[in-house]
Amino acid sequence: ITGYGDTRPLYTWNNPLLTRRNDRVEIYIEIKKLKKPPKKDQ
């Protein structure tokens, strides 16, 4: 997953509500990545 960074996030909102929704999306992506089986073992 690319687009999320400490210096240049994919989405920047002036509205705190939209920022909060963006944070929830980022957390959802992190959970999805944790559920993925690691390809390094293969």
Image (spheres, rainbow, N blue to C red):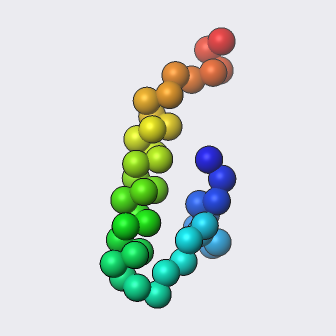
Q: Where is residue 6 in the image (x, y as percent from the top left)?
A: 58, 67
Residue 10 in the image: above or below residue 30: below
Which residue is the extreme one toward the bottom? 14
Q: In which quarter of the image is the C terminus?
A: top right
Residue situated in front as seen by the camera: 29 or 7:
29
Q: Where is residue 33 in the image (x, y as percent from the top left)?
A: 50, 37
Residue at 62% x, 47% y is 1
Q: Quadrant of residue 9?
A: bottom right
Q: Quadrant of residue 38?
A: top right
Looking at the image, residue 42 sits to the left or right of residue 23; the answer is right
Q: Position of residue 10 (x, y in %)?
A: 60, 67
Residue at 50% x, 28% y is 36
Image mark count = 0
Residue at 64% x, 72% y is 8
Which residue is the extreme one toward the top? 42
Residue 9 in the image: above or below residue 31: below
Q: Where is residue 37 in the image (x, y as percent from the top left)?
A: 52, 22
Residue 36 in the image: above or below residue 13: above
Looking at the image, residue 21 sits to the left or right of residue 3; the answer is left
Looking at the image, residue 40 sits to the left or right of residue 19; the answer is right
Residue at 40% x, 48% y is 28
